[in-house]
Amino acid sequence: MKLNFAEQLLVNNPVRAAVQMFYEGPLLRRLGGTVQGGTVLEVGCGRGTGIEVILRQFGAAHVCGLDLDPAQIERARKRLERKYAGQISLVQGDAERLTFANASFDAVFDFGALHHVPTWQKSIAEIRRVLKPSGTFFFEEVTRAALERWIYRKFFEHPSENRFSETEFLDELRSQGLRDFSGIHRTLFGDIFIGTAKLPKP
Ligand SMILES: C[S@@+](CC[C@H](N)C(=O)[O-])C[C@H]1O[C@@H](n2cnc3c(N)ncnc32)[C@H](O)[C@@H]1O
């Protein structure tokens, strides 16, 4: 689901960009390695800071940013299209129904998008489908316990059912065939978890 006004303010700003650039990007690279010369998808790319992180810190050759909200795609387009011409593509679409061919990406990134997706399990299935064998899924996610806190309930909007704990999220990845998990890093008292998993070779 699209972000409400308060959450748009929370994510579309330089502080959030700095967290992605200087904390989450380096941490994910330590956990999952780089994707030198690879083709990468970011689901829920928002204004596109993650796309820049993936190009600059992971060495991707091309990043496709996908977001449900056309306004977010437009923000990313304004910020990145000229600077990274030929290296990026931006697509309005739903992470539950990806339109890409099977096995088309070396890596998929999720910077805090799947807890906005009503049937996030479908998105995991789609991510698995579009990953190449040996491809890596990099994720940073927000738990059900976090979404139940007063501050989240008061200011932000999320799907009210089918939220996940860290364990449920990781179990779903396992049950859909992802393996080779990195260690899981937790921040904000376990409200946010960060890690990587791989699709094995057939
Ligand atoms: C919390 S924001 C995170 C934005 C950015 N990745 C970041 O870390 O700052 C979640 C993003 O996911 C997008 N989103 C929500 N549901 C989606 C869906 N079903 N498919 C694709 N994008 C979705 C929202 O529009 C929003 O831009």
Image (cartoon, rainbow, N blue to C red):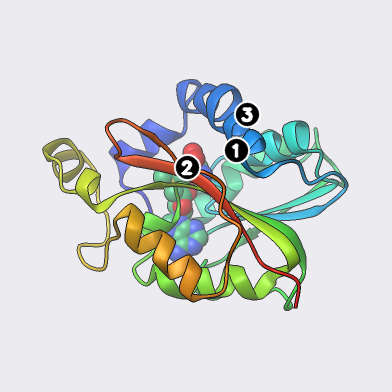
**Residues under numbered marks 1 and 3 in contact, where contact means CB atoms less than 8 Å apart:** yes
Residues at marks 1 and 3, CA–CA distance in whole angstroms: 6 Å
- Residue occupied by mark 2: 194
Tell me which amino acid carries mark 1.
Leu
Q: Which of the pair 6/54 is nearer the observer?
A: 54
- Residue occupied by mark 1: 28
**Residues under numbered marks 2 and 1 in contact, where contact means CB atoms less than 8 Å apart:** yes
| Image height of 156 relative to 67, above or below | above
Q: Which of the pair 60/175 is nearer the observer?
A: 175
SS at badge 2: strand
How would you rate the neighbour count of disc 3 (Cα within 10 Å): few for under 14, some for 14-19, many for 20 or more?
some
Q: Earlier in the sequence, mark 3 or mark 2?
A: 3
The quarter of the picture where residue 115 lies is bottom left
Q: Which of the pair 175/85 is nearer the observer?
A: 175
Q: Quadrant of the C terminus?
A: bottom right
Q: Residue 26 bears which disc, if any?
A: 3
Q: Quadrant of the N terminus?
A: bottom left
The quarter of the picture where residue 177 lies is bottom right
Q: Earlier in the sequence, mark 2 or mark 1?
A: 1
Question: In this figure, what is the number of numbered marks?
Answer: 3
Locate residue 201 relative to residue 77 in the image: left or right. Answer: right
**Residue 1 visible in the picture:** no
